[in-house]
Image (spheres, rainbow, N blue to C red):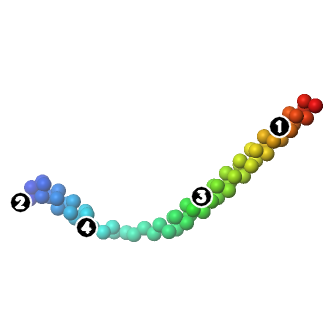
């Protein structure tokens, strides 16, 4: 009869030698993440440009009001 330590050792060995039952193809996931990253960077650049343009318009309007 096996004691607890032997059973645990056998379980650890079987876990370490077992191969996964399924293989996950990550190339599509990586491609989607890369595409989303580039889209996010493009949108971020547009938002920064729009905010900068609004600041410039605000400064110009405040300068015209002072005249």
**Nearer-N-terminus badge (2/1):** 2
For image coordinates 52% across by 68% down, the residue present is 28
- Taking 22 as reference, is 5 left or right? left
Residue wearing tag 3 = 37
Q: Earlier in the sequence, mark 1 or mark 4?
A: 4
Earlier along the polypeptide chain: callout 1 or callout 3? Answer: 3
| Discs 2/3, front | 3
Tag 1 near tag 4, CB within 8 Å: no
CA–CA distance between discs 2 and 3? 57 Å
* SS label for mark 1: helix
Question: Would residue 56 appear left or right of 41 to someone viewing this image?
Answer: right
The CA span between labels 1 and 4 is: 68 Å
Q: Give whichever of discs 2 and 4 has the lower sequence position.
A: 2
Q: Position of residue 51 (x, y in %)?
A: 74, 44
Viewed as shown, does residue 11 lie left or right of 32? left
Residue 47 or residue 59, whichever sits in front: 59
The image quadrant of residue 52 is top right
Which SS class for mark 2? loop
CA–CA distance in space, label 3 to label 4: 37 Å
Vertical placement of residue 23 versus 4, above or below = below
């Amino acid at each position: 009869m096996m004691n607890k330590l032997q059973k645990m050792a056998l379980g650890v060995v079987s876990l370490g030698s077992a191969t996964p039952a399924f293989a996950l193809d990550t190339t599509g996931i990586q491609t989607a993440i890369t595409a989303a990253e580039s889209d996010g960077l493009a949108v971020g650049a547009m938002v920064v440009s729009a905010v900068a343009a609004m600041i410039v318009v605000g400064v110009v309007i405040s300068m015209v009001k002072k005249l």
